[in-house]
């Protein structure tokens, strides 16, 4: 239950609050691996799928931004193993070199100046240089750890430099380091002037990498264990570049394997340079879908990560800690939440209507029911053109059927209690609830925890006191709004993505509010041909060329976590050809106040989806009308959506 009471011992001074906030931001706010630098390994928690990554087989690690791909891949690298295992590579079971695809570099390998085959050859040489440069870094570190034992014999260094086609033949590891770096820089300069410069000599794709690894494997401390070529943000490669690397993956030897991180739908090409040859799972690689792997264990995994971070807090804010961070986020039952949302005012009206029309014994039965159950009776009557008396007598006649109904609708009822009332419309509170809102995305979860704890401190409280439901809800709305704003800068389709989220969010928010007479918790959609839906007006002016953008927008939305998709669970209508169901990422559910749980779905036409972006006002009305719901655009928006009023008032 909410409480505004604070004891003196729980109050913090301004300086204590600011110190705790600064510590929280350092521990929870640096949620991107790129921001953490060496602290990344200090805060590292091994995910459940990590052992699968360490096998000698190539792997595709699939997940959206913030799911932990980069952290896991960097833990595979030799820098990560040095920090997480030991300074002695002889004790390691594998050796990894990490490369994060740089869009600025790889997009230079295209243009009308050269043919596709020539660009592929140039990129293949560049990839050789990149990997070999990272192998040199690893080899130099090992050499420093064993200064009395030569890591690379002169003949081996010469073979590598010849295979790599560097300008000057190297006879030592240090010489090779200089030549590889110089060749890479010179080659990048050539690519930037490819139309005017003379082409340098190129290496054979993959050959220098294999030669280098053979040389390193001859060292007694490195022999008998695989090397990993770790590639992060694979989606940043151009299509032809993915085919080049696919070829290396397809024909990797027992010496090395590829560990590739990619966003869902970011692996656009499955073929090799031989168009008749494809990468197939599990013959060529192991597919590891982070969302699937973490689905049933994410809440506990998040506890491990956050407990480690919050244990590093110092000062009075951490005094009297409740133990595990989970205790700071106690669950909020649906009955307690209904009380916070003032369900009593609805039940009073229902009881007043019943009292003169039923017996005292029947009224006693009504009064004995949980408050939310009593509200269901009035809710059901409104949605099925019944009087409250008729609905209650039906309950008396078939209590078992009503108990099932109550189980199905109990959560859904909460979204209807504060319709057209200022303030919180729905609470998002409790550790497991926030874990579901995060959608197995550890970055989103760290944002939720950080913002909740910061709000808690601003209220003058310590971490010896559980967070209020309102505090957690406000934080969840802030995180949803922040990620909505961030969408605009993530893609060339960023504006489309943010408008799509705003349109769909409003649709599902109104559906949640107007749940009478409908299946509970509709928050997913599937695409159908527009001839199967009744809407027409919103799609006027959308030509066939524009319609082709639907697939592009969907792909971008899934890649950048505006939407999540999953295989359709059952057929919908005859003739449907779409294979996936979609929903807004649950991180947006607190912003709009609808269910974060994966539940029921509605049909949306393909062009209708595009019209949500281009002409939102009439399209939102159309989609709602198809489910027998209405929306008056003159109605005041929920408080948390007030900033987007101009978007919803736009259009015709």
Image (spheres, grey):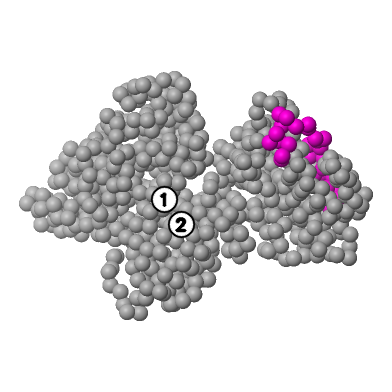
Residue drawn at 78 percent across, 36 percent down: 205
Q: Report if residue 393 lies within the magenta region.
A: no
Instruction: Say left or right for 86 vs 477.
Output: right
Position of the N terminus, as image quadrant, is bottom left
- Left or right: 223 with respect to 284? right
**Are discs 2 and 1 less than 8 Å apart at CB?**
yes
Highlighted range, magenta: 188-217
Q: Is residue 17 above or below residue 591?
A: below
Q: For the point 35% across and 71% down, which residue is it?
A: 460
Query: Judging from the image, what secondary structure is the residue with disc 2 in?
Result: helix
- Residue sitting at 61 percent across and 41 percent down? 103
Q: The C terminus lies in which quarter of the figure?
A: top left
Residue that badge 1 annotates: 482
SS under mark 1 = helix
Q: Residue 201 in magenta?
A: yes
Q: Which mark is residue 218?
A: none
In the image, farthest residue toward the bottom: 9
Tell me which numbered mark, 2 or 1, is placed earlier along the sequence.
2
Residue 594: percent from the left, percent from the top?
34, 46
Q: Is residue 464 visible?
A: no
Residue 447 numbered mark, or none = 2
Labels 2, 1: front one: 1
Query: Quick one: which residue is furthest to the front in this view?
Result: 196
The percent coordinates of residue 509 (x first, y second) are 31, 43
Q: Is residue 590 left or right of residue 207?
A: left
Total marks drawn? 2
Residue 133, image x, y percentages:
76, 49
Residue placed at 29% from the left, 60% from the top? 336
Residue 420 visible in the displayed image: yes
19 or 276: nearer the viewer: 19
């Amino acid at each position: 239950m909410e409480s505004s009471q604070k004891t003196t011992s729980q109050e913090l001074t301004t300086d204590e609050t600011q110190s705790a906030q600064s510590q929280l931001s350092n521990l929870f706010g640096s949620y991107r691996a790129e921001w953490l630098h060496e602290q990344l390994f200090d805060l590292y928690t091994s995910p459940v799928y990590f052992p699968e990554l360490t096998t000698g087989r190539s792997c595709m690690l699939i997940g959206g931004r913030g799911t932990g791909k980069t952290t896991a891949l960097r833990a595979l690298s030799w820098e990560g193993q040095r920090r997480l295992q030991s300074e002695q590579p002889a004790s390691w079971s594998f050796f990894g070199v990490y490369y994060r695809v740089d869009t600025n570099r790889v997009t230079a390998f295209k243009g009308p100046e050269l043919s596709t085959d020539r660009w592929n050859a140039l990129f293949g040489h560049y990839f050789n240089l990149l990997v070999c440069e990272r192998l040199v870094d690893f080899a130099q570190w090992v050499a420093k750890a064993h200064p009395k034992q030569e890591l690379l014999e002169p003949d081996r260094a010469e073979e590598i430099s010849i295979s790599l086609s560097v300008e000057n033949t190297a006879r030592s590891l240090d010489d090779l380091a200089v030549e590889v770096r110089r060749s890479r820089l010179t080659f990048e300069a050539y690519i930037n002037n490819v139309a005017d410069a003379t082409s340098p000599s190129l290496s054979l794709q993959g050959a220098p990498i294999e030669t280098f690894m053979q040389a390193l494997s001859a060292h007694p401390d490195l022999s008998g264990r695989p090397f990993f070529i770790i590639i992060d943000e694979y989606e940043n490669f151009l299509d032809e570049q993915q085919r080049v690397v696919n070829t290396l993956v397809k024909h990797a030897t027992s010496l090395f394997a590829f560990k590739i991180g990619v966003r869902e739908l970011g692996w656009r090409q499955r073929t090799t340079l031989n168009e008749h040859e494809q990468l197939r799972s599990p013959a060529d690689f192991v597919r590891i879908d982070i969302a699937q792997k973490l689905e049933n264990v994410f809440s506990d995994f998040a506890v491990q990560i956050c407990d480690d971070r919050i244990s590093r807090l110092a000062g009075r804010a951490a005094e009297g800690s409740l133990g595990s961070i989970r205790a700071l986020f106690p669950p909020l039952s649906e009955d307690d939440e209904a009380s916070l949302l003032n369900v009593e005012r609805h039940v009073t009206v229902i009881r007043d209507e019943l009292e003169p029309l039923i017996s005292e014994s029947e009224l006693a039965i009504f009064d004995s029911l949980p408050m939310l159950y009593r509200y269901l009776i009035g809710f059901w009557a409104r949605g099925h053109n019944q009087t409250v008396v008729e609905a209650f007598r039906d309950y008396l006649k078939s209590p078992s059927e009503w108990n099932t109904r109550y189980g199905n609708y109990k959560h859904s009822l909460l979204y209807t209690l504060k319709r057209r009332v200022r303030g919180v419309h729905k609470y998002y509170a409790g550790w497991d609830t926030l874990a579901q809102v995060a959608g197995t995305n550890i970055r989103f979860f760290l944002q939720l925890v950080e913002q909740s704890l910061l709000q808690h401190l601003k209220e003058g409280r310590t971490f010896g006191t559980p967070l209020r439901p309102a505090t957690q809800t406000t934080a969840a709305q802030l995180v949803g709004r922040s990620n909505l704003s961030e969408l605009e800068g993530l893609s060339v389709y960023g504006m489309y993505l943010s408008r799509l989220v705003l349109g769909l969010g409003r649709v599902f928010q109104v559906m949640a509010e107007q749940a009478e007479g409908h299946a509970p918790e509709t928050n997913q959609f599937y695409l159908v041909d527009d001839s199967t839906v009744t809407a027409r007006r919103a799609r006027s002016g959308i030509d066939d060329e524009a319609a082709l953008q639907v697939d592009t927008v969907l792909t971008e939305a899934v890649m950048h976590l505006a939407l999540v998709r999953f295989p359709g669970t059952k057929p919908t209508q005859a003739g449907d050809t779409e294979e996936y169901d979609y929903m807004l990422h649950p991180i947006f559910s607190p912003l709009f106040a609808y269910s974060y749980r994966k539940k029921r779905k509605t049909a949306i036409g393909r062009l209708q989806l595009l019209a949500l972006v281009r002409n939102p006002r009439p399209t939102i009305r159309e989609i709602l009308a198809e489910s027998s719901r209405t929306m008056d655009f003159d109605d005041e928006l929920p408080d948390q959506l007030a900033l987007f009023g101009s978007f919803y008032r736009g259009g015709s």
